[in-house]
Each structure stands twice: as structure tokens, then as C-alpha cells.
Image (cartoon, helix red, strand yellow):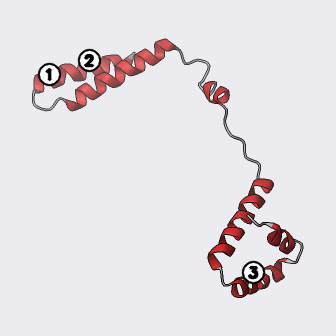
Amino acid sequence: MEITCWEQINETSENDLDTRLYKRILKDNQTEKQIEYFSEAMRIACEQSFKSEKATKQSQKNRSVPWWTHELTVIRKTTNHLRRKYQRTRDNAEQMETNKAAYFEQKAK
């Protein structure tokens, strides 16, 4: 893309920028092309101005808290399974009470 025209505009004052952009769009009669140039110039300006760090796989891997163990993961999955089982039991009241008791017992652990 032709960014040189925007680099030249970059050297002028901010007040003059709107006027020059407006005149360029009217003169060229290619609004879409000018919008693409402007968008690209904005993208480049943002990349140079703002600091952005992408998370690496290593940093994402170490995001868990140090006290969380595999044993806690198993207990959590079991508890969630029992909760879903209890919540989905609708027809049989006796089975619902059994599932409820099992869920609350597991939840207390």
C-alpha cells in the first residue's frame, strides 16, 4: 500500500490534516482507496504507539494458582457432576432427594 502520502501529511499540523484529507478525497474521487490508506495509516500508528504483548503458551500454562492440585480437580468435577445430576432429576421425587443428599455431601468436602 502507498503510505508515503500519509507520512507526508503526518508532518503537518493536526488542524490542517482534516482539510488535506478532505481535498485529497475530492481530488482523487476514489473514496474507498483513501479510506483504505487512512485505515492502514491508523493501524500502523497504533502498532507503533501502543504496547501490546501476546500471551505465550508458557505464560498461559503457569496461570493457575499454586495450591490447586489434581486431587482438587477431581473433587470439583465430581461435585459438578452430582450437581447436574441433582438438577436434572425431575420426575422421581425419591431419586431427587437421593441425588440432592449426594450432591450436598460432596459439596461439603
Q: Residues within 10 Å of mark 2 (few under 14, many from 20)?
A: some
Measuring from the top left, give residue 102's x and y in whole percent: 26, 17
**How far across and how far down the image is residue 81, in percent?**
31, 23
Q: Residues within 10 Å of mark 3 (few under 14, many from 20)?
A: some
User: Label 3 near label 2: C-beta < 8 Å?
Assistant: no
Labels 2, 3: front one: 3
| Quadrant of the frame with the C terminus | top left
For marks 3 and 1 on the same chain, the one whose residue lies earlier in the sequence = 3
Residue nearest the observer in this picture, 50 or 48: 48
Identity, as a three-letter code, of the amino acid under mark 1? Gln
Where on the picture, by quarter, is residue 28?
bottom right
- The quadrant of the picture occupied by the N terminus is bottom right
List the residue tagged with mark 2: 102
> In 3D space, how far apart are the residues under numbered discs 2 and 3 (Cα atoms)?
70 Å
Which mark, residue 21?
3
- Front residue (pair 85, 38): 38
Q: Secondary structure at mark 3?
A: helix
Horizontal side of 85 relative to 52 (left or right) equals left
**Residue 29: percent from the left, percent from the top?**
66, 84
Q: Judging from the image, what secondary structure is the residue with disc 1 in?
A: helix
- Residue 25 in which image quadrant: bottom right
Mark 1, other Cα within 10 Å: few <14 / some 14–19 / many ≥20: few
Q: Measuring 80% from the left and 55% from the top, which residue is drawn there?
A: 48
In the image, is residue 33 above or below residue 80?
A: below
Reading the image, the residue beneath label 1 is: 95
